[in-house]
Image (tube, grey):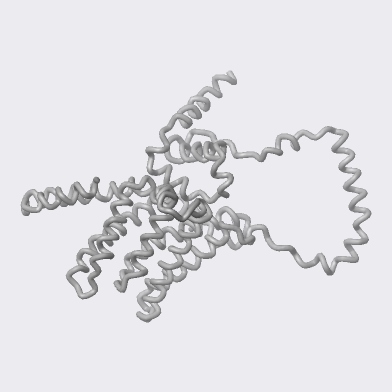
Amino acid sequence: MGEEREDPQKLKKIAAAAYDYENDPRWADYWSNILIPPNMASRSDVVDHYKRKFYQRYIDPGLVVESMSSSGSSQSAKPSASSSSSSTRTNDQTRSQNSGSATRNSGASATPGPSPSLRWDRQTIQFSVNAWVFIVAVLAIIPLVPTSLSNRAYRLSLMGTACSSLYSLYTLYGKPRAWNLQALQIYFQSIIATKDFIYFIYCLTFVTSHLCLKFALIPVLSRAIEQVAKFLRRNFSRSTLYRKYLEDACVWVESNTTTLSILSSHAEVVLGFLLIISLVSWQRNIIQTFMYWQLLKLMYHAPVTAGYHQSVWTKIGGTVNPLINRYAPFLNTPISAAQRWWFR
């Protein structure tokens, strides 16, 4: 009977292990948003664990995923009776010997040490920058803020996201092994399809332009909200303040990351058309428009964003193509040429 009860889970685990994660754009987005140290990200058991969690979330909720345990937990879980009793006696002796010194040093020991969640590691730095980006971006889109302050907040939020993305690329991929053409080419091939690199180029495109499009802050805000919510849930889940005021919002954000990604992809495509429209104004920037459409092409093909952008362009094609065929068939030739460049 026990084997029969275990068979469904065994089959689910086999199916999860055989699933084609690399061709699922949701997996690339899911994995890129997991904040773990680089040395753990290279371990196969850690990757397999998060693949099973991804499979449980998106494919089969009935899959049971066991929590990861430390390597030494199995050894410390079965102490002998003699060692247990001896350790108890040792602890009693230690407490009796240190009781006097604890009283004498009460003044020095009254000051608590730093909280582990406040250590300035990579995740804390990223959280601080993204929280700052979120605050500044909200300040930039509030209508009542003066124009000069709003424009400055707009550029500061883009610069903060660019710095955050660049720092994430450095911590995950390091720097090129050498500063020659071949080494740089290999390095950029390894990072060009990552979400951090795409956001870095995205922010760089708008922060260097005199054109101020507040609509460009939608992807920036979505990224900042995701990163802040994940950090708060992982590090402050036991905090009373978090449970009272922030838990519901953070849970909603983490359960709707796909919705935020879809919103960002729609905003990114709309920005491309806004830049084309801006070419007829005095604020036109042909180089910026061309660079941004190259970035949109990269987003269409990169695994971390391809699923969302391809869905947007499919909707646009389903709406626009019948109208062009009916009212402006002469546009089919230039559209076909643009599509050849797009898919090349």
Left or right: 156 in relation to 109: left
Q: Position of residue 162 (x, y in %)?
A: 43, 63
Q: Residue furthest front?
A: 180
At x 24%, y 64%, the residue is: 274
Query: At x 37% / y 64%, what residue is drawn?
Result: 204
Location of residue 213 (image quadrant) = bottom left
Q: Nearer the viewer, residue 6 or 123?
A: 123
- Whether residue 2 appears in this view of the structure is yes
**Residue at (45% x, 71% y) in the render:** 136
- Up the image or down, 134 lies above or below 64; here it is below
How many callouts does the rendering have?
A: 0
Q: Is residue 250 visible?
A: no
Residue sticking out furthest to the top: 1
Could you say where residue 115 lies in the image, as x and y percent from the top left? 68, 61
Name the spot of residue 212 as percent of width and height, x first: 31, 72
Report the quarter where the N terminus lies. Answer: top right
Closest to the observer, 23 or 201: 201
295 above or below 279?
above
Q: Position of residue 121 (x, y in %)?
A: 60, 58
Residues 326 and 206: in front is 206
Foreground residue among 291 and 155: 291
